[in-house]
Amino acid sequence: MTHKGTELFLILLATLPGAALALSTDRDQPVHIEADRGELDDVKGVTIYEGRVVVTQGSIKITGDRVVLYYDDQRDISRAEAVGKPATYQQLSDGETEPLKARALRMDYQVKDGVIDLYDDASVVQTGNSLFGSRITYDTVNERVKASRSGSGEDRVRVILTPKAKDGGKDGKKDGAPEPAKGQPANAGPGKGAAR
């Protein structure tokens, strides 16, 4: 679907398997920040970090060349902006073993809303599934992903969906596994175990 003839939007509702709510314990964890430089404006409730910045809280990890953190009246982080080549975000979800990984040249994370906007050369990857676009909005609360191309660019939204591995059948073989040829043992490959 085109919008004003310049943007292509793709809405993926729960197509990234495992793209579920973040670890429920992340917000209870302390925030750790590493950078080459840091500047605090306590009146505005803003801190600016530059130089190989790494921000972690539980399973959440944000990296960038420059990260700006905005605080609310309770001194909780309400927003994080990251710029890098690339800036990255990753977070583990409850029940998952592989984290969601996002990257872009610029990102804006609305912490309280759980919405991450990725701009320029953006991607979101989890459990073998990938989404690429000029702009990606990932809503971690409502499990929605929206991707678009740039207004003037020729790049398009790309999606890679990896099929889930099927569970073993009653005999322990994975569904879709080829049956051995008649007269060959089950563990024999081509040319093995056959009479010559």
Image (cartoon, rainbow, N blue to C red):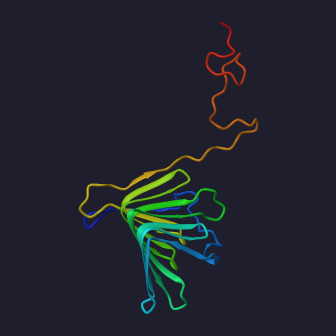
| Residue shown at the point (55%, 72%) measured from the top left | 141
| Residue shown at the point (59%, 47%) measured from the top left | 164
Displayed quadrant of residue 168: top right
**Location of residue 75 in the rendering, given as x and y in whole percent from the top left corner:** 53, 87
**Location of residue 61 in the rendering, given as x and y in whole percent from the top left corner:** 53, 66
**Location of residue 52 in the rendering, given as x and y in whole percent from the top left corner:** 44, 66
Q: How many marks?
A: 0
Q: Name the outermost residue toward the top.
A: 196
73 relative to 34, above or below: below
Q: Does residue 25 appear to the left or right of 171 in the view shown?
A: left
Q: Does residue 26 appear to the left or right of 155 in the view shown?
A: right
Can residue 32 be seen by looking at this rendering? Answer: yes
Can residue 107 be seen by looking at this rendering? Answer: no
Q: Name the outermost residue toward the front.
A: 36
Quadrant the C terminus occupies: top right
104 relative to 57, above or below: above
| Residue shown at the point (42%, 90%) measured from the top left | 44
**Location of residue 145 in the rendering, given as x and y in whole percent from the top left corner:** 46, 64
Q: Name the outermost residue toward the right.
A: 171
| Residue shown at the point (23%, 62%) measured from the top left | 152
Q: Does residue 171 appear to the left or right of 7 in the view shown?
A: right
